[in-house]
Each structure stands twice: as structure tokens, then as C-alpha cells.
Amino acid sequence: MHKLSWWLVFGLSLSAFAQRLAVIGDWGAESPHRPLVAAAMREQHNQNPLDALLTVGDNFYPRGEPVPRYVQDLPPVRIYPAFGNHDVPALDKQLELFKVERPYYTVRLENIEVFVLYSEDFGQAQRRWLEAVLKASKAPWKIVTIHRPLYSSGLHGGARSLRQALEPLLTRYQVDLVLAGHEHSYERLEAQGIVHITAGGGGAWLRGFLSVRPQSKVRLQSPHYLILEATAERLRMVAYSEKNTAIDQVELKK
């Protein structure tokens, strides 16, 4: 199990960390803040290079058709996407664009292994696959990315059936972090010893919160993206606004 620490001072040096990943969700829309978030991420990359970029779905609105300009606005690193409900109509085109064979897969990035799930069609085959790869993983940090959050204080309230299917596996195989989108807001929660972050403010229009979940720790209606940095002993997550101001931060320790 890991120890969980919240930081009140955001100006701490992160240079000691080995892997550096960015995370965005619900980002492929022609909104005023999409290019601002993209530019903030490029600034981060120029100052301290990123190793990769993760998405938590709804990569292109309204029906998933890729927009090359949106991708070109992002930092020039490998993108590992999850796929959301708006991506389904053009899923094949996105799989080709991002060079992945199917909408659920796993990727090892040094100290981190990312398990990308497909929430729009989560059946027994995908669940069996997930259990097998989680069981086999030797990564110090296990991160699940999925579009629909398992817990949420936002408009959709969390995907109960997904939570029932996934949570036993997440706890059994000691997943450290679940990243989701779908809600166009930022929320950090903790449930069953796992940190859940909804990072759905990467470009689409923002929404507020309806009913605050008891697991909720931080809720912000702000454009944002995340930076994850990891060594074998520490995993730090910082949420940044479109002005590159840190708006939330949490660190996990082994």
C-alpha cells in the first residue's frame, strides 16, 4: 500500500523524478480554452520535456472525426489515448491516427504501467484481459485510464456498473491511480485506498457539480491538464490551469 500526501506549496522542484507524463481529457473541441491549455502544455514540455501524453477520452467533438490541427497544437510526444462516447462514431480513424490496435491496451513507461480501458463497451472479454495484465504487471505504479469516472460529483454522477465490475480488480491488484474524463471539470477523490482524478477540462465546455460525493477531496470548475512524475518510490500529480498555475497537487509514496 502507499502513503498519500497533500501539498499546500506548489512551487516545489520536480526535477528529481524520472518519468514525466501529461494528461488531458475531453479536449478536442473548438472552445476558447482548448488552445490555451495546449499552449500551456507545450510550455511545460519546452521547460522540462515530457515522455508521453495520456488522454482520458472525447478526443474529438462532436463525432470523433480527427482534427489534425488539434493534435498539432499539443506537445510533440507520443499520445496514448483512451476513447470516450464522442469518439465511438470514428473509432477506427482514431485507432489509425494514434497507432493503437484496439481501444483497450497497456503500455509500460519505466516505473509506470498504464492500463487503458474502453468504457463504452466494457464486457467480460475486456475484464478478463484486464485481470490478466494487472496480475502480470511488475510496475512500481499502476495507473488506469478510462473515460467514464467510477466516482463523480458532476453531472453524470459516476458509472456505477463500471465501478462494480472494476473496483474488485483495482483493489486486488493494488492499482494506485484511476484517471477519467467525461465530466467537464476537475475532481480528485479517494475510494478504497485508490486516488481517482477526473481531468475533463482539457478543451471542451466546462460544467459544475451536482451532488458532492463523500469520497471527493477537491472540485474545481477550471480548464486544466495534469502532469504526472514518477520514480520507483514516488508518484506526484499536479493539476495546472490554462495559465500554468498549479491548482491541485498530490503525491503517493510507497
Image: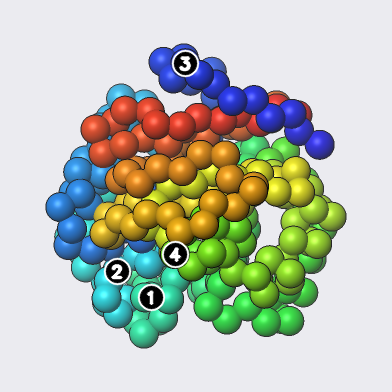
Tell me the kind of residue under disc 3.
Val
* Residue occupied by mark 4: 155
> Farthest residue in the bottom direction?
89
Number of residues whose C-alpha sits closer than 10 Å to that of mark 3, classed few (under 14), some (14–19) or many (20 or more)? few
Instruction: For mark 4, give the secondary structure.
Output: loop
Tell me the kind of residue under disc 4.
Leu
* Residue occupied by mark 1: 87
Task: Using residue 244 as the reference point, say whether residue 193 is left or right of it.
Answer: right
Task: Tell me residue 124's x, y (percent).
Answer: 73, 81
Quarter of the view holding residue 89: bottom left
Task: Tell me residue 249's x, y (percent).
Answer: 50, 30
Q: Distance between the residues labelled 4 and 2?
A: 20 Å
Q: Do the residues labelled 2 and 1 touch (CB within 8 Å)?
A: yes
User: Do we see residue 188 in this rendering?
Assistant: yes
Tell me the kind of residue under disc 2.
Phe
Q: Which mark is first along the chain, 1 or 4?
A: 1
* Residue occupied by mark 3: 9
Which one is in front in this view, the residue at disc 4 or the one at disc 2?
A: 4
Task: Tell me residue 207's x, y (percent).
Answer: 34, 57
The foreground one among 68 and 143 is: 143
Q: Are marks 3 and 1 in contact (CB under 8 Å)?
A: no
Quarter of the view holding residue 216: top right
Please, is residue 64 above or below residue 111 in the view? Answer: below
* Residue occupied by mark 2: 60
